[in-house]
Image (cartoon, rainbow, N blue to C red):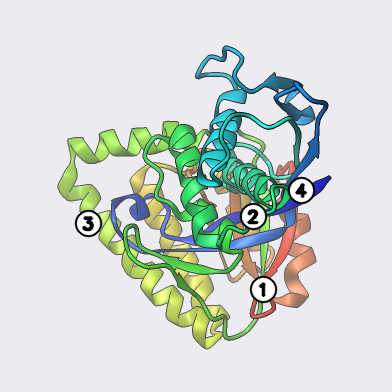
Amino acid sequence: MTTAHAPAKVILFGEHAVVYGRPAIAVPVMQVRACAVVEDGPPGQGMVIHAADLHLRHRVGAPIPVQSPAYPLEATVRNALQRLGIRGLPDLTLAISSTVPMASGMGSGAAVATAIVRALAQHLGQVLSPREVSELVYQTEVIHHGTPSGIDNTVIAFEQPVFFVKGEPIETLHVGRPFRVVIGDTGVHSPTRDVVGDVRRAWQAEPEKYEALFDRIGAVAVRARKAMEDGRGSTLGKLMDENQELLQAVGVSSPQLEKLIHAARAAGAMGAKLCGAGRGGNMIALVAHQRAQAVAAAVHQAGAVHVIVTEVGPWLP
């Protein structure tokens, strides 16, 4: 039996603009993660996927509609086996579980795919680099999101804070001083594919307006990188607020997100914004150590269905 895990992620800066070639910053969230367990099955069984969270049991190769949650799981398995040079389907059972909230901007699909790829490679006695894992998981991200930026698979596969520009070499970030982030889940599912598609249509209708917004979001990400490297938390918080204003202008905030963001700021957060696609999912707030629990409690009282307090810092692998 082989077990592998993969963390969630949050985007600190640069949502949506990253799809159009601007920089973004994302960090792993170790408190929630996906898990994949691979075991040898009886001869002749073939490959069986069991995802208890989804009430799903699927034999790889059986007819499957594209809309089924089993479709991206099977695609991940097949792509991984092909990369590993395995012909045919080995007699294996793959069990998947995850504590990463779905459709909430935390990279649930990429986390599950990363855990699957890692578990299969390890069980079959092979080693894949983080870059190879990321490339495989990107193929699954295309299924989930249509036109993914590539940031989810990158930060989750490398398990490090990253400064990401689509199509350019990955840059991992040095964090000058650890900082805490409160993550609040609105409980509103907001599929990334749908929101990204809406933004693309808006960009096509008004390209000059949206290109200008994306430029400004990218500039915020560049300034945020410097603030992170220098350990300037107060500056980072102000940049989060600025990024949130721009995301409102893009049209991806929501009343539920705004309520949690305002609650976090009122409770003493240095800055707060939505994270991920928006229109639901999660918000994040940058907090001083001594204010973390107060901000978390305020966000929960304002309606968050789940609240996570995580630390970002040099301790990450």
Q: Which mark is residue 126?
A: 2
Tell me the residue that label 4 is attached to: 301
Q: Does any portion of residue 24 appear in the rendered image? A: yes
Q: Residue furthest left?
A: 208
Q: Which mark is residue 212?
A: 3
Label 1 to label 3, Cα distance in Å? 34 Å
Tell me the residue that label 1 is attached to: 316
What SS does tag 4 mark?
helix
Q: Amino acid at mark 2?
A: Gln
Quadrant housing residue 280: top right
The answer to the question of whether label 2 and label 1 lie on touching residues, with beta carbons closer than 8 A, is no
Q: Residue furthest top?
A: 63
Q: Nearer the viewer, mark 2 or mark 1?
A: 2
- The residue lying at 29 percent from left, 38 percent from top is 200
Q: Quadrant of the N terminus?
A: top right
Q: Amino acid at mark 3?
A: Ala
Q: Amino acid at mark 4?
A: Gln
Label 2 to label 3, Cα distance in Å? 46 Å
Label 4 or label 3, whichever comes before in sequence order: 3
Label 2 to label 4, Cα distance in Å? 47 Å
The answer to the question of whether label 2 and label 3 lie on touching residues, with beta carbons closer than 8 A, is no
Give the answer, above or below, for where 162 lies relative to 259. below
Q: Amino acid at mark 1?
A: Leu
Q: Nearer the viewer, mark 4 or mark 1?
A: 1
